[in-house]
Amino acid sequence: MQILVLGGTWFLGRAVAQEALGRGWGVTVFNRGRSGAPPEGARSVQGDRTVAADLVQLAQQGPWDAVVDTSASEMAPRDVLAGARALEPVAGRYVYVSTVNAYRGWPEEPLSEESELLDGPPDADVEYGRLPEGWVGPDWYYGRQKAGAERAVDTIFGGGRSVLLRPGVILGPGEYVGRLPWWLTRAARGGRMVAPGAPEKTIQPIDVRDVAAFALNQAAADLGGAYNCVAPIGRDTMRDLLTACVLATGSDAQLAWAPDKLLLDHGVQQWTELPLWRTHKGVWSIQSRRAQAAGLVCRPLVETVEDTWAWLSGGGMPVEHPRWAEHGMRSEKEAAILAALGPR
């Protein structure tokens, strides 16, 4: 197999490239060269996928059996469309990493691959779906952009040649968002530690290496389609995650469970101040039976936690990204919540 990875130097893109190299595949990575070097053994082509001349030069490096697109998270659908159009003559299949945000019902409703997608035309620009100032209601901008990008890929690589992967939360070594790293570093400090919501609340994060392996399996398969890339509903809980963080770091942290209402009363920002905590009923109710039937395997959550801590404590540094600063709670705010909980 010969594959082209759009991205390839950090987190999911790097995991895809490394997994493919481990399989003995030929790997070309295409990026702007701003986020580190590609894995050893990969052929590197630098360029900007929003520049038409760069896409022409990239296509001349083909052909490939498949493209795996991991770098379009902030890209307008029309740019994804242009890239797909440029690569279609030299690529057999296109695997596009989308998101569960593309569903109209997320995070309010339980979801499956048959759930309704948001509107978003394949040729939309980056302004499509932006909300007016003062808007009160759901913010579907990101989801509309991703739904439009999915349609862009299908427009060019339809007929069973396009694969759409919709992960929820991706964790693991190399994470740049800062969700699991924040919990691990907080657990490592020890002491009484706020744990959000109900301990047995189900969660569905997936390891970056499992998404990478599934993406490559689909790149080599004969069928197209859409797949939710999440861990099975009910397999893992918030207690499982935080207990694993305490054990992995070897700390003396004690989990102090704070009810949703108390956290809301203290103005805790959902999803970010206490990462992965959210009260919406559909956020962790995403069916992935189609992906599991197609071979998606999710390693134990404790393995993801342990490997991420080994990466962090071993000097691992994520690619700099503004989302890292969004995650985590100030110690003063945590102390106020712990005081409101009363004695342990």
Image: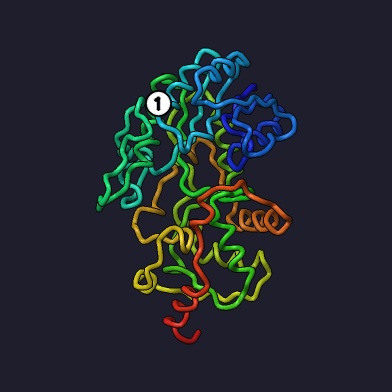
In x, y percent, where is residue 248?
66, 64
186 over 82 or under it: above or below: below
How far across and down, in percent of the image, does residue 198 sit?
42, 69
* Horizontal and vertical percent position of residue 307: 67, 54
- Residue for badge 1: 78
Relative side of 147 to 184, left or right = left
Q: Position of residue 65 (x, y in %)?
A: 59, 20
Q: Nearer the viewer, residue 52 or 317?
A: 52
In the depicted structure, whether residue 6 falls above or below residue 308: above
Relative height, residue 126 to residue 66 (above, below): below
Left-right relation of 123 to 53: left
**Picture quadrant where residue 220 is located:** top right
Q: Please name the amino acid that badge 1 sits on.
A: Arg
Q: Quadrant of the N terminus?
A: top right
Q: Residue at x 65, y 33 (%)?
A: 17
Residue drawn 62% across and 34% down?
8
Secondary structure beneath dot 1 equals helix
Residue 227, quarter of the rendered image: top left
Callout 1 environment at 10 Å: few (<14), some (14 to 19), or many (20+)? Answer: many
The residue at 55%/55% (across/down) is 178
Front in this rendered view, residue 331 or 290 = 331
- Report whether 71 appears left or right of 22: left
